[in-house]
Image (cartoon, rainbow, N blue to C red):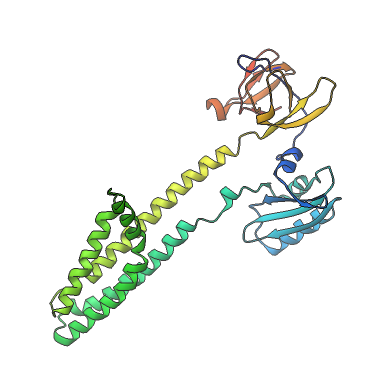
Amino acid sequence: MSCCAPGAEMALDLVNTGSVLPSSQEIRLASRSLGDDLRQTDLSVPTVHCAACIEAIETALGMLDQVESTRVNLSTKRVAVRWRGNQVPPFVAALGRLGYEAHLFDPEVDNKDKTLSELIRAVAVAGFAAGNIMLLSVSVWSGAEGATRDLFHWLSALIAIPALAFAGGIFFRSAWNALRHGRMNMDVPIAVGVSLAYAMSLYETINHGDHAYFDASVSLLFFLLIGRTLDHVMRERARTAVKGLSQLAVRGAMVLRGDGARDYLPVGEIEPGMLLLIAAGERIPVDGKVSRGTSDLDCSLVSGESTPRSVAPGEAVQAGVLNLT
């Protein structure tokens, strides 16, 4: 079955052999050398959830030839495998037999979201401060006067200061960065409004005024931070979905040489005229034309069509489609 790239001959041979994803060639490319012929491969195993999983994985992989050591990190759901030799040990297949789906670890995807952690801490601080100031304000609303009212106002002011400094810092830093570059953003009016509400309340407290608005300024900050956190979560979900699609991109393919030799090459090194072997379960890395064999292709990633497409020698195929048979 054969495929040709636009403007150049390129052949793809769709074979019906089984494949393990990621392939051994991809694992070797993703592994790092530790010296003395020792290499380490980091895998993400999302279904690891208990100590029994750790024992099963480390025991099974430790029995493989060429595997020096295996370490499972339960908190990050990662497996670090150290191995020797020219042939990649079948640790992905071994994990599959145990019922654990593994894929190559991608630092960009698996890093913790520090921004979300900061937002959650800010929401917690603002919520704690708003709740306590509201409790103090109830007495003032109920008719407390004189020294009692002033005491509660001063206590509210003291509670609001760290809340505005820590939780409000997210808005203040953004607003200052915009203003010092001569522009406005949505955080500027938020910072101004919260600051003015606190300043006016502090002025009233110093002058023994009847009304203060510390509760309003901190509560406003609390609800704005909730909205900012939810917005960030939704954006991160969308970003993760896009990165998940990008991981479907093919990293390389098996090239069949004229003398019958087979070499695995990264996509960037594939040239027009090369004959590629595409096993069942692998994606076609480049546009081409079927040279030998017949197969069914899943073109949903490219065209959105869910029905498999049958191809025969001479038909063109696009990069990104999945060979099913």
Front-most of 54 and 272?
272
Q: Is residue 78 above or below residue 168?
A: above
The residue drawn where x is 43% and y is 48% is 234
Q: Pinpoint residue 173: horizontal percent, then vertical percent.
A: 35, 59
The residue drawn where x is 56% and y is 54% is 111
The residue drawn where x is 78% and y is 53% is 82
User: Does 233 sit left or right of 30 as displayed?
Assistant: left
Q: Pinpoint residue 57: horizontal percent, then vertical percent.
A: 75, 56
Q: Quadrant of the C terminus?
A: top right
- Residue 159 lies in quadrant: bottom left
- Residue 322 lies in quadrant: top right
Front-most of 235 and 182?
182
User: Does 114 sit left or right of 32 as displayed?
Assistant: left
Looking at this view, name the residue that lies furthest to the bottom: 147
Looking at this view, name the residue that lies furthest to the top: 314
Q: Pinpoint residue 209: horizontal percent, then vertical percent.
A: 13, 77
Q: Pinpoint residue 167: horizontal percent, then vertical percent.
A: 36, 65
- Residue 73 lies in quadrant: bottom right
Q: Quadrant of the N terminus?
A: top right
